[in-house]
Structure formats: C-alpha cells, structure tokens
Image (tube, helix red, strand yellow):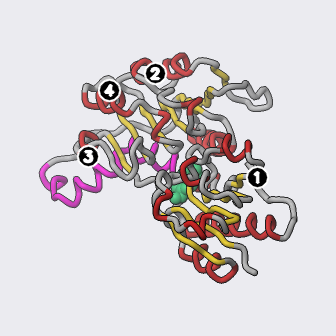
C-alpha cells in the first residue's frame, strides 16, 4: 500500500510527478482552511509536503491525525508550525545547503544592480535617452562597509562574495562567531549606523519580525543600501516605503516582501529600488536539488532511515 501524501500549494513539476508515482498524492491549496479536504483523506494522510511561503499551519495540521512528517521545500520554515509538530512528535525537514550559493548570488546581484543602477541603465538605453544625454552616475560596489544580519550559511556565503570587492564585512545576530574574521555587532541599529550596505540573510519568524524598523533604516541613512533575500517579515515594510520615498534611505534591492506576491504600489515607481519575485533559490539547478531533498527525506522516513535534513 502506497503511503498517502498531501501537497499543500504548488510544487516543481518534477517533484509532483515523482510524488504521484511513489505515493497516493492529494492536493490542497489553502494552508489556513482545511474545509476542502475530504474526511476520509484527512484520516489517511501520513506526510505533508509544502514550500516556504505556504508552510504548514495549525488549521490543516490539526485535521491530519495520522501525520508522520512535514517536508518543506525551503530552508526557511517560519510558515510551518514547528512547535505544533514537535508537540506531536512529527519531524519537519527543510532544504538547507543546496540553495546557499544561489541565494547569496541573488544578494550580490541585487547589490550590484542597485549600486551600479543596472535596471535604470537598461531602461535608459531602451528608451533612447542615451541619444540625448549621458545617464547620471551610479555608485561603486567596492571598498564599502557591508553589514550582514544573520551570519548563518547564506550570510557567510554573501560575506565570501563581498571580500573580492574589497568590502569590509560586519555582522549582527544572536551570537558572535569568533572563528569568523568579521566585525560583530550585538545591536542591529548600531551596525546599520556603521555600514553602507545592510544585507538581510536571517531566518524569518517571530524573533526577527520587523527587526529592520524606522530606527534601523534611519541609521543606514540616505546613502545606505538595503538588500533583503531573507523574509519580508524582517522589515517594517511601511517604514521602508516611507524611508525610500522621503529620501531617508538611499536605495534597496528586494527579493522578498511582507505579503507576497503583492508588492507595495509605492515601490513600483521608484528608480532607486530593484525588485525580484522571491527568486533567490530560483535557478533550475537549485530548485531541482531542493526537490530531490524533499523526495529523499520522504523516502528515508518511509524506509525507516534517518532523515537527511531534519529541522
Ligand atoms: C523558496 C525560500 O523560494 O528556502 C527558502 O526559505 O524562501 C525559498 O527557497 C521557496 O520555498 C520556493 O517556493
């Protein structure tokens, strides 16, 4: 008898087709409302598969009495009710490591795009404005001070990429990491005041919610650059929009937002902002590796082997 698996939200086609061939697969869209899930299915589901933004929340988890595992297609499990799962002895797996380099690449790509005004320059050429005048100058990438909020795997991969540009690396997080050759700050606003670039690579969730508020943005200042490849929840988005429109913050490169896929209207008209549709891990290679890890964790669970990447 094939185990029954519930897929909440959408998923890479490669993962869906392998789930379909290995398990009895059920689909469900709304992570907050289980009402569309038939009673008999609820009683048979043994695994739940989801991705970062959708997660696995209490209303759906609570109607699955036979649930044995939650496999999340993301490194960030802030949308999974891990506390509820722990209480029921349900392991949660995520997809660390395989996405580290691509997410760090996105942080650097956004930083370069913002500093060198790559998107504005592209528009400038396409609109024929170069024929009339040279474009205003941008700012250099190198020899700046960069502050990384969250010096985990992704933060360290960003730091490694900044060094060849001659950037000085600072970081902030719950603990100093004396093994790293970077400057530690316990206080985020103090770090923001000491750097030119503030790059967010920390986990989302309650501990970091709105950590980047008006005070931090003002400390970064009118020549400062904010890059966010972590979670929209880390930034007070209204404060960010106000700081950018009022010129209290220089520029921003954003891959993540508070209410994805909705992006504040005010950001769409700003030339000093570069936007991405939460695409940090979105390369064919990385998404494939993330999918593989989801499938391998499920296979390990049902074969009674140790999980590859439990949270
Ligand atoms: C994904 C992510 O974009 O790993 C994470 O935490 O946010 C992402 O890699 C997402 O889960 C895929 O849709």
Query: Which residue lies at the image location 67% right of the left edge and 59% below the top edge?
Result: 71
Q: Let me know if residue 299 appears in the view.
A: yes
Residue beneath disc 1: 310
Residue beneath disc 2: 216
Q: Earlier in the sequence, mark 4 or mark 3?
A: 4
Does the magenta segment cover residue 125?
yes
Label 3 crowd bin: few (<14), some (14–19), many (20+), radius 10 Å? few
Q: Position of residue 195 (x, y in %)?
A: 51, 24
Element type at marker 1? Answer: loop
Is the CB–ligand 1 distance for label 2 below 8 Å?
Answer: no
Furthest-right residue in this view: 305
- Determine the CA span between mark 4 and mark 3: 15 Å
* Disc number for residue 268: 3
Q: Please state the extent of the stretch shown in magenta in the rendering.
A: 106-132
Residue 4, compared with residue 149, is above or below; it is below
Q: Tell me the quarter of the picture where residue 95 sits.
A: bottom right
Furthest-front residue in this view: 39
Q: Quadrant of ligand 1?
A: bottom right
Q: Earlier in the sequence, mark 4 or mark 1?
A: 4
Q: Position of residue 136 (x, y in %)?
A: 25, 40
Does the magenta segment cover residue 120?
yes
Q: Earlier in the sequence, mark 1 or mark 2?
A: 2
- Determine the CA span between mark 4 and mark 1: 39 Å
From the viewer's side, name the closer residue of 104 and 145. 104
Label 1 crowd bin: few (<14), some (14–19), many (20+), radius 10 Å? some
Q: Position of residue 62 (x, y in %)?
A: 61, 51
Residue beneath disc 4: 243
Q: State if disc 1 and disc 3 touch (CB < 8 Å).
A: no
From the viewer's side, name the closer residue of 123 and 237. 237
Q: Position of residue 1 (x, y in %)?
A: 76, 81
């Amino acid at each position: 008898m094939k185990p029954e698996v519930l897929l909440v939200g959408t998923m890479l086609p490669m993962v869906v087709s392998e789930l379909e061939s290995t398990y009895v697969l059920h689909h469900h869209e709304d992570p907050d409302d289980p009402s569309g899930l038939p009673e008999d299915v609820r009683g048979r589901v043994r695994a739940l598969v989801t991705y970062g933004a959708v997660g696995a929340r209490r209303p759906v988890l609570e109607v699955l009495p036979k649930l044995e595992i939650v496999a999340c297609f993301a490194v960030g499990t802030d949308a999974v009710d891990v506390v509820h799962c722990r209480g029921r002895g349900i392991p949660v797996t995520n997809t660390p490591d395989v996405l580290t380099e691509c997410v760090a690449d996105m942080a650097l790509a956004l930083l370069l795009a913002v500093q060198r005004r790559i998107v504005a320059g592209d528009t400038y050429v396409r609109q024929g404005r170069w024929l009339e005048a040279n474009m205003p100058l941008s700012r250099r990438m190198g020899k700046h001070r960069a502050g990384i909020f969250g010096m985990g795997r992704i933060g360290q991969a960003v730091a490694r990429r900044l060094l060849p540009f001659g950037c000085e690396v600072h970081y902030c997080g719950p603990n100093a990491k004396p093994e790293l050759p970077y400057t530690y700050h316990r206080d985020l606003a103090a770090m923001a005041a000491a750097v030119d670039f503030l790059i967010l690579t920390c986990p989302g969730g309650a501990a970091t919610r709105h950590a980047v508020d008006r005070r931090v943005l003002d400390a970064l200042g009118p020549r400062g650059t904010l890059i966010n490849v972590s979670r929209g929840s880390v930034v007070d988005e209204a404060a960010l929009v106000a700081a950018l429109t009022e010129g209290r913050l220089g520029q921003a490169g954003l891959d993540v937002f508070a209410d994805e896929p909705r992006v504040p209207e005010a950001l769409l008209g700003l030339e000093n902002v570069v936007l991405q549709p939460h695409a940090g891990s979105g390369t064919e290679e990385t998404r494939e590796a993330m999918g593989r890890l989801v499938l391998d964790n499920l296979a390990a669970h049902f074969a009674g082997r140790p999980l590859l990447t439990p949270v």
